[in-house]
C-alpha cells in the first residue's frame, strides 16, 4: 500500500483507539501485521509516538477551556504552595501527581519495550488482560464519586495504572478508566480524568521521539508528508472519539469494548495459528 494512504489509515486508527479503551499501540502493531504492510517507517515506534502527538493536539483542542483554567491554577498553586480551596488548583495538583509513575516507567523501560514487547501474539494476550480488568472494574466499581472526590493517593494509583499501558494491548485509556472505576468514579468522570491526565504523558513521549527524529536517530528521508498525514488523521479522529466516548459513557457501560477486545484477540490468535 502507498505509505501516505497507510499513514492515513493508521492515523485514523490511532485517533479512535487512543481514547476508546481498546489500545492504540496494540492496533498500530496489529493493523500493519495483519494487512502485510512492511514499510519500516510506519512500523516504527517514533512514527507511532508522533501519531500520539496528533491525538495530543485533539486533547488540547477539545479540553481547551479546561487547560486555560488548569495551567494558570497549577502555576498559582506552585507559587503559593497551596491549593487555597480552589477546585482548579486541586485538579491541577492531582493531574501532576499522575505524571511521575508513567514518566519514570517510560524512562526505564522504553527501549526494552521498543525491542522486545511489540509481538503480535503478546498484543493479543494483553487485549484479553485489559478486557478482564475493565470487566472487573465494571462489576466492582461503585460509580458514586466524581473527580472532585479524588484524593492524592487515588490520583497516584491511577497514574501507576497508566504506566502499565506502556505494554501494547493494555490501553492507556482502558487501564486508567478501569482504575478510576475501581476507585468508585462514575464512568464519564473516569474517562474525563483519563483524558486530562493523558496530555502531559503524551506530550513528554512526543518530545522525546521528536528529538530522535530531528537528531537523525530515525531517518525522516522523504517521510515527512507521511508523518504529517498520519498526524492529521489522528487529530481529526481523536476529536470524534473523545466526544463520542464521553457521550456514550454517560448512559452506557464499557462492556462493548470488553467484547471487542476479546473478539479481536481471538481473531489474532486464529490468524497466528493459520
Image (cartoon, rainbow, N blue to C red):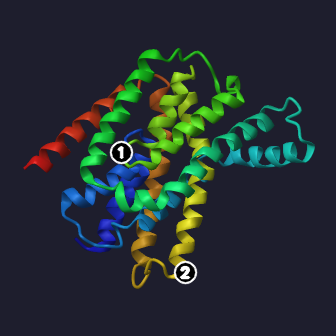
- Which residue does the numbered mark 2 point to in the structure image? 215
Q: Nearer the viewer, residue 240 or 121?
A: 121
Residue 274 picture location, percent across and down: 7, 50
Residue at x 64%, y 41% (from the top left corner): 98
Residue at x 26%, y 61% (from the top left corner): 32
Q: Secondary structure at mark 2?
A: helix
202 left or right of 225 in image: right
Specify the quadrant that holds the N terminus. Answer: bottom left
Label 1, residues with CA under 10 Å away: few <14, some 14-19, many ≥20: many
62 left or right of 140 in image: right
Label 2, residues with CA under 10 Å away: few <14, some 14-19, many ≥20: few
- Which residue does the numbered mark 1 point to in the structure image? 169
Give the mark nearer the N terminus: 1 vs 2: 1
Q: Nearer the viewer, residue 29 or 86?
A: 29
Q: Quadrant of residue 205?
A: bottom right
Q: Secondary structure at mark 1?
A: loop
Residue at x 50%, y 60% (from the top left corner): 54
Residue 233 picture location, percent across and down: 42, 60
Where 214 falls versus 142 (above or below)? below
Q: Are marks 1 and 2 in contact (CB under 8 Å)?
A: no
32 left or right of 60 in image: left
Where 242 falls versus 258 (above or below)? below
Residue 195 picture location, percent across and down: 56, 42
Residue at x 44%, y 48% (from the top left corner): 18
242 left or right of 150 in image: left
Amino acid at each position: 500500500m502507498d505509505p501516505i494512504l497507510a499513514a492515513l489509515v493508521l492515523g485514523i486508527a490511532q485517533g479512535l483507539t487512543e481514547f476508546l479503551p481498546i489500545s492504540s499501540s496494540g492496533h498500530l502493531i496489529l493493523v500493519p501485521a495483519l494487512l502485510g504492510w512492511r514499510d519500516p517507517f510506519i512500523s516504527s515506534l517514533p512514527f507511532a509516538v508522533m501519531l500520539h502527538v496528533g491525538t495530543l493536539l485533539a486533547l488540547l483542542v477539545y479540553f481547551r477551556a479546561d487547560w486555560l483554567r488548569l495551567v494558570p491554577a497549577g502555576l498559582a498553586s506552585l507559587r503559593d504552595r497551596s491549593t487555597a480551596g480552589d477546585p482548579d488548583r486541586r485538579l491541577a495538583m492531582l493531574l501532576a501527581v499522575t505524571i511521575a509513575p508513567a514518566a519514570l516507567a517510560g524512562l526505564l523501560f522504553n527501549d526494552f519495550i521498543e525491542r522486545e514487547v511489540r509481538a503480535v501474539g503478546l498484543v493479543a494476550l494483553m487485549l484479553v488482560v485489559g478486557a478482564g480488568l475493565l470487566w472487573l472494574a465494571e462489576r466492582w466499581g461503585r460509580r458514586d464519586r466524581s473527580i472532585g472526590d479524588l484524593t492524592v493517593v487515588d490520583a497516584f494509583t491511577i497514574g501507576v495504572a497508566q504506566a502499565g499501558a506502556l505494554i501494547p494491548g493494555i490501553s492507556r485509556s482502558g487501564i486508567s478508566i478501569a482504575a478510576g472505576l475501581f476507585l468508585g468514579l462514575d464512568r464519564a468522570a473516569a474517562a474525563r480524568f483519563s483524558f486530562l491526565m493523558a496530555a502531559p504523558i503524551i506530550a513528554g513521549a512526543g518530545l522525546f521521539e521528536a528529538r530522535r527524529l530531528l537528531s537523525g536517530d530515525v531517518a525522516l528521508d522523504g517521510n515527512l508528508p507521511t508523518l504529517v498525514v498520519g498526524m492529521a488523521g489522528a487529530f481529526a479522529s481523536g476529536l470524534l472519539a473523545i466526544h463520542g466516548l464521553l457521550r456514550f459513557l454517560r448512559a452506557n457501560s464499557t462492556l462493548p469494548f470488553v467484547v471487542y477486545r476479546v473478539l479481536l484477540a481471538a481473531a489474532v490468535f486464529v490468524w497466528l495459528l493459520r
